[in-house]
Structure formats: C-alpha cells, structure tokens
Amino acid sequence: MNSILKIEDLHVAVEDTPILKGVNLDIRQGEIHALMGPNGSGKSTLAYALAGHPKYEITSGKVEIDGTDIVELDPCERARLGLFLAFQYPVVIPGVKVADFIRHAVTNVRNPDRKEGENLMPMREFRKELKQRMEDLGMDTEFARRYLNEGFSGGEKKRMEILQMAMLQPKFSILDETDSGLDSDAVKVVAEGVNRLAGPGMGVLIITHHDRLLEYNIPQYTHVMLGGRIVETGDAELARELHNEGYQSVRERHPQEATDQLEPSAS
Amino acid sequence: MATDINEKEQVDIGEYQYGFHDSTDKYFFTSGKGLNEEVVAQISEMKGEPAWMRDFRLESLRIFHEKPMPNWGSDLNRIDFQNIHYFMRASERQGKTWDEVPEEIRKTYDRLGIPEAEKKYLSGVKAQYESEVVYGSLDEQLAEKGVIFTDTDSALKDHPELFREYFGTIIPPHDNKFAALNSAVWSGGSFIYVPPGVEIDFPLQAYFRINAQNMGQFERTLIIVDEGAKIHYVEGCTAPTYSSDSLHSAVVEIIVKREGRCRYTTIQNWSNNVYNLVTKRAMAYRDALMEWVDGNLGSQVTMKYPAVYLMEPGARGETLSIAFANKGQHQDAGAKMVHCAPDTSSRIISKSISKGGGRSSYRGLVRVEKNAARCKSNVVCDALILDAQSRSDTYPYIEVENDNVAIEHEASVSKIAEEQLFYLMSRGLTEAEASAMIVTGFIEPLVKELPMEYAVEMNRLIELQMEGSVG
Ligand SMILES: Nc1ncnc2c1ncn2[C@@H]1O[C@H](COP(=O)(O)OP(=O)(O)OP(=O)(O)O)[C@@H](O)[C@H]1O
Ligand SMILES: [Mg+2]
C-alpha cells in the first residue's frame, strides 16, 4: 500500500504571527512535488511545521500520515513515522561525531519501538552501510569522524543532509533548498543522490529556486506558494516557467496573497 | 569511580547516587554544634597542636567574625554557622591498609570504588571522612625519592619546618571570610612535597566524603612542587543527601617552583544540600606550569575560582572548568589569573550547562600588573542552556596596568539549545537522547583533556545528571 501525507487547511503561526493561512497538499509515496514561491512566502515555515519545530505553532488544520494525525507528535515520533526534513540551514552540533549521531538516529528510526538505552545497530554493519552511502554521494569518509556540521562548507552541509536521508530511508522527504549554495558539480551529485532514493518508496517535496535539481527529479506537480497559501498547482512545465519568468504573473493573478506577502505583519 | 556494586544497587539512576549515609554512633569525637573560641581551641587540643597553630586558629576566628559575608555571587544568608558541627573524628587513627579502616567507613569507600581505582592507576590515595583522613597510601618508590604525601595534620607534626614555611602564605586568613573560617577550624586535607626533578606519572588522589548531617568539612591542602618536578593531583567529593545543609569550605595552596608542573583535577559531585565555598590558589614561578581542571557538579551553591599567580617570567597558568547546574543549584565558578611578571601566559576555558531551572555563572578575573609586559591571556567561555527555566550569566573582569599585552576574551552568547534539540529530534532521537548528546558534545573538548579514567567518570556523572529529570 502506498503511504500518503495529507495536509489539510493548515494554519501556522510563529510567535503569534500567522504565516501559513490554509495550506492543502497531498503527497503520496513515489511522487515528486516541487514547491516554489518568492522569498518569505512560507515554504520553510511549512517544512518546519511538518517536522514539528516547537516555534511553529499549528493553530488549525490537519497533518496526517496514513490517517494518523501527527500534529501533536514530537519531532522524533514524526521521524519514526517516516518523515524527513533536509534543512535549509543545517544546525551545527559541536563535539558530536557524525557517525555516532547517524548510528543513533538510524537505530531509532528503523526500530520505532526502541527504548532509550537499548542496543544500537551493530557497528560493523553500520560502518559498511555508511561508507557505501558516503561513496555514493562522493563524500570523503573522513567526514564520519568530524563533528556534525562544525566547520562544514555550505555545500558540505547540504550533502550531509542528503547522507542522513539516504541512511534513514524516509517515506516522505522535504528538501528545503538543498540545491542552494552548491556548485554545479555538487548539485549534480546531490540530484543524482535524490534520484536514486526517490523511487516508489519515497515521496519528495522539493523546495527550490533553481531548476537543476528538478531536471534530475522531474516533478509530477509544481506548487506555488504566495502569502502563506498555495495559489497555483501545475506540472513540471510550471516550474520551468516560473524559473524563466519569475513570479510577476503569479502576483498579478493573486493580488490578495501578493499583498499579504508584502506586509506579513500588517494585518 | 564507579564500581559494579553501586551500579547494581542503584535503583533509580536519575537520583543522586552517593546519597546513602552511615551511622555516626561509633564516632570517636563530635564537637557540639556552633562556632566559638572554645570549639576552636578544642579542635587544636584534640590534635595536639603546637601553640603557634592554636594562636593562628584563634586569630583567624577573630578575622572570620570581622569579615562581612560576600555580597556578590550567590545568596549565602541561609548558612547558619551555629547549626554546624565543626569537627568530627570518625576513626581513632589513620589506616595504612584498608583493613585497618573501620568496617563501616571502609564499605563506603568500596561503594565509591576507591580501593579499586587505587590498584589500577593511582600512585597514592588519601581518604578523608568527615574531618580527618582515615586512610593513606603512597607508592613506595616515590616515598624513597623523598616525595611526601600525607594528611595536613600529620604534616604539621612530622614536617614542622616545611609546613611552617609555606602554610598560609598563599592564602592568608584575611583573604576572605571563608578562608578565615577554614584557617580557624581546618582539619585534614593533603600535604604534598615533590622534591626537585621528581616526576610522578600516575595521579595522587584524595577522596573527600561528608557523612554526617549538618557537617562542616574544612580540609586544608598544601602542595609544594619543587624545581623541575611534576605532579597530577586529583580530588573527588561526595556527601549523603539530607534535608538540612552541610558546608564544605576548603583552602588549597600550591607552590610550583621553577620549571615545575602541577595539574590539580577536581571532580566534585556533592549532594544538593552542600554549600561548597572553596578558595584555591597557586603561585607559579619561572617557566612553571599550573593547571586547574575543575569539574563542578552537584552541591546547592558552589563558589569557586581557582587562581594562578604568575610570579616570574615564563610562568603559565591554565584553568579548564565545567559547571553543571541542575534543579535548585547555583554554580558560580570561574578562574582568576594574575600576571605579576613579564612574559607570562594564561588561559581560561570555561563551559557551563544549566538545566531544569539551575543557574550557572562564569566569574573570572584576568589581572595584569604594571611590570608584566608581553604577557598573553586567552579566555573562552561557553554556556549551554537546556530549557527556558534555566539561567546562565557571565561576569568577566579584566584589569590591565600594562599596554604591551595580548588579551583575548570570547564569550559565546548563551542560547537555549532549542535549534540543536529540534535538529537531532527530527532525526528520531528522543528529547532525552538529544539533550544528552548535545551536552556530551559540548563538554567533549574539555573531557578530552582528562586522563581516560576521569574522562569516563566525568561523562558518567554528566549522564546521571541528564537522566535525572527526564520524565
Ligand atoms: N522563527 C521565525 N521568527 C519570526 N519570523 C519568522 C520565523 N520563521 C519564519 N518567519 C517569517 O515567516 C515568513 C515566511 O518565512 P519562510 O522562512 O517560511 O519563507 P520561505 O518561503 O522559506 O523563504 P525563502 O525562500 O527566503 O527561504 C517570513 O516573513 C519570515 O520572516
Ligand atoms: Mg526558506
């Protein structure tokens, strides 16, 4: 059975300021969706709210994975249900080694019923798998010993996100501008990496301002966000159009949302 | 120093693990509660001290009464000086083997894992129980080389000249109120002399245990590292959990002579009812190195700022400190570096963790005297706050009288680790696992500096603190 992530009339506020104002979106396992929209339109807000960031308060609406409401769940419970977010700005965790962290995460996500303190995934098996995935992404295996994101270049951080995705094998991945800050070779590596993982087992929401990632991962759907709502949905052609022509025509077609977008806190 | 025994006995790992206590019925002597000239004179008499020490104590008591309570740092007004026992003798004499130590007391140290650690990696041990040292050992080869490692009471009797030459010269009684108190009622502590050129490779360890309720422990430690000598001294501390308060107020004086090296490591793990007010100071001479490694966990209030006075060119001072403030605790800790000579250098690295409503403060002073040209100092402090109820403050003081110096101070603005927690949790780690991982990573650079055994101990204590509150 194909899993489904259902987002229904989602409203999200940050520190009492409404940002998302009724988002509807269904993503099935195996589908690729692109989410575009001008800066500040609410794309990352949607990503954080789905992953369960405590600052992003869901004030109304529903988010379900296969009928299970996840709105009240902790981020870790959502991860164990198969949700993954590749961060636009990955967080630095000093002193925590990449391998230790991923081993812990993988163990938990693969055994959702694991209790704290129970055995981690066997070291040898883990190492072998991690090494393989790092090679797939053209990463020096030395990174496994480094502290998580500490001193990583922008592109290295993004690759580290994709490595985690590859190890965790989520059902639903949200990639928040994973392609920004990458040189063109790196975009290619990451895009191929996503492509390899994005088979029938994974539904992907690609948030992007560029087209390279979408060239390798052709979306069935493209959504445009403006002023905290999805205002248009099309196919891959829409993504290309927006990329070439910008958002002016979208703004003209949706003057109300365009105004919201300009003055987010005026209302 | 974990043993298998106490790990098995531990029922709820979140609780303070060393909170058990023994009966005090068989004690040889217990001073009544309260502080006055009679009590002080009695302590001196019990110990059979020379007149000069009795007079020193009585004079110190006078200074103690004169000095006001510090009006900075933590609130100390709850300390009731008249509700404290100032002297307790639990054992008639000091054991040279563990078999000579009274059984109840020996069992305590077994539970704390001291005899085991001694066998594995220590050059010598002193175990202080209440006011006095109940067990002492020193590697024979070191003794043959002239190393002295004894308790401070015995040193006064057995090495009177050496003792009198240095005692109270680094921290005189009028230094501060609690130094005066310690000088009046001091008992126990370690006395160490390392002769020129003797390098001690394995640590000497002292273990301080408070057992009775309303106990005041006032050990007095004096370490003299002669020219080119080297030592690593480690102290550990625990106490039972009582509802009423105990007071631990030690004085530690250290002299590191030319090219000598001294590292003093503290892994303090007092129960939450202990006021821990300690004065620690070292003087480092030409090309000498003094390092304080200070792990402050537990206690209700800790105020402690290990100091190094850099007395001659080439002297170096270093303090690495970790403070963990949990529920109901205030850790006011830091360091003091005083550059009294040119071409001296100092480094302070401080990390604090606040959690469950705990409060930690970094308080540090770097002082450069007028003649101390070309000296260098580097201060780095980092604070980690795990929840919105907890608090962290930084009070850096820098006093520079000379223009030709290089002083760096970096304080990372302490933020609640919310983004870090969210990031790790979004990968499937529970909140408890995520915060434990963040904390372990945060102190990693410091723990790395510890010898293996202590690094393991430190990580274990931190883990216990982390498990404590998660529900
Ligand atoms: N933590 C926050 N605190 C305050 N305001 C926030 C916060 N997060 C988002 N916002 C506001 O919400 C709006 C939407 O921001 P969001 O990051 O979701 O935009 P975006 O579509 O991802 O933009 P970009 O393309 O620049 O990444 C912006 O006006 C932003 O300032
Ligand atoms: Mg964004």
Image (cartoon, coloured by chain):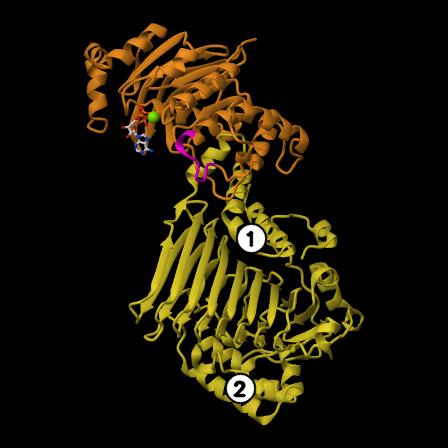
Q: Position of residue A203 (x, y in %)?
A: 48, 14
In the picture, one chain is yellow; tell me its letter.
B
Read off the residue under disc 1: B447
Q: Main secondary structure of the magenta part?
A: loop
Task: Indicate yes or no whether the magenta region holds residue B421.
Answer: no
Q: Position of residue B438 (x, y in %)?
A: 50, 43
Q: Secondary structure at mark 1?
A: helix
Asked whether disc 2 touches disc 1, contact meaning CB atoms under 8 Å apart, the reply is no
Q: Quadrant of residue B113?
A: bottom right
Count residues near mark 1 (Cα–Cα under 10 Å), then give few for <14, some for 14-19, many for 20+: many
Read off the residue under disc 2: B57
Task: Indicate yes or no whether the magenta region holds residue A153.
Answer: yes
Q: Colour of chain A?
A: orange
Residue type at mark 2: give it: Arg
What quarter of the picture does the C terminus of chain A occupy? top left
- Cα separation between marks 2 and 1: 39 Å
Q: Position of residue A61 (x, y in %)?
A: 38, 19
What quarter of the picture does the N terminus of chain A occupy? top right
Q: Is residue B470 above or below residue A5?
A: below
Residue type at mark 1: give it: Val
The stretch in magenta equals A149-155
Q: Position of residue B8 (x, y in %)?
A: 73, 49
Q: Nearer the viewer, residue A30 or A14?
A: A30
